[in-house]
Image (spheres, rainbow, N blue to C red):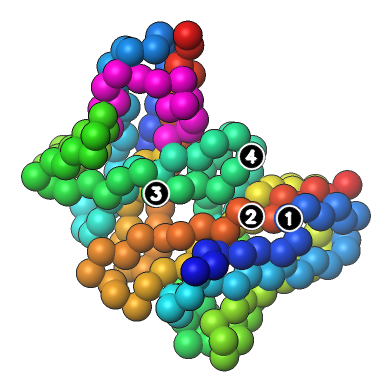
Amino acid sequence: RKEVEQDPGPFNVPEGATVAFNCTYSNSASQSFFWYRQDCRKEPKLLMSVYSSGNEDGRFTAQLNRASQYISLLIRDSKLSDSATYLCVYYNFNKFYFGSGTKLNVKP
Amino acid sequence: DAGVTQSPTHLIKTRGQQVTLRCSPKSGHDTVSWYQQALGQGPQFIFQYYEEEERQRGNFPDRFSGHQFPNYSSELNVNALLLGDSALYLCASSSPDRRMTEAFFGQGTRLTVV
């Protein structure tokens, strides 16, 4: 079983749509959780950290469910510039574990 | 403030050759981790250096080795290159504050083995 599992997509959505991604992780002792964004042939960049209480940053909302070991990312009012691959990540004992990413295509 | 810098950005090598990739961490960061990202996959942890020692290692063969220098910069060496080593190699540095550690990535080195 992979450490982090994500639906690879692609998710093809029109501008203005709301889209949600989920991922599951295997290690219940995981310490910290993140969503990273990766544009084509570029390095991953931190989008947001994920807290148990849920957190929001503008159009982006992240949730963590420790009991079910899943993390979600909600993007509201999608923009063309949101098109990218979104990587679900957890951190445990000095290592980051990445999912394979979910590809999002926002269409005009 | 310079972020994480890696060199070279692109590299083409022949099977069996050896390669050295370099990374300078973000200012103030003392920990450097290396990741391999194959096409269509997420980054996979190779190893991490802290205080010039390899602190953790992922599931990679001994052909992959590294080093960290007193200024915290780091090198990744790969010997006896295989076609399957073709990937984007990412260096990430992190802060001494480990309460909420996040990784800052360099732009990567794209290695092609032919």
Q: Residue at x 64, y 55 (%)?
A: B108
Circles 1 and 4: CB atoms closer than 8 Å: no
Q: Which of the pair B18/B71 is nearer the observer?
A: B71
Helix, strand or loop status at disc 4? loop
Q: Position of residue B94 (x, y in %)?
A: 41, 69
Tell me if mark 1 has few (under 14), some (14-19) or many (20+) residues whose alpha carbon lies within 10 angstroms of its own: some
**Amino acid of disc 2:** Gly
Q: Which residue is mark 1?
A: B9
Q: Which residue is mark 3?
A: A46
How much space separates mark 1 and mark 3, taking CA atoms? 21 Å
**Amino acid of disc 3:** Leu
Task: Residue B9: say if magenta.
Answer: no
Tell me if mark 4 has few (under 14), some (14-19) or many (20+) residues whose alpha carbon lies within 10 angstroms of its own: few
How much space separates mark 1 and mark 4, taking CA atoms? 11 Å
Q: Which residues are magenta?
A: A73-86
Q: Residue at x 17, y 48 (%)?
A: A51
Tell me which corner region of the image, top left, top right, bottom left or bottom right, holds residue B71.
Answer: bottom right
Q: Which residue is mark 4?
A: A41
Share a chain, discs 1 and 4?
no
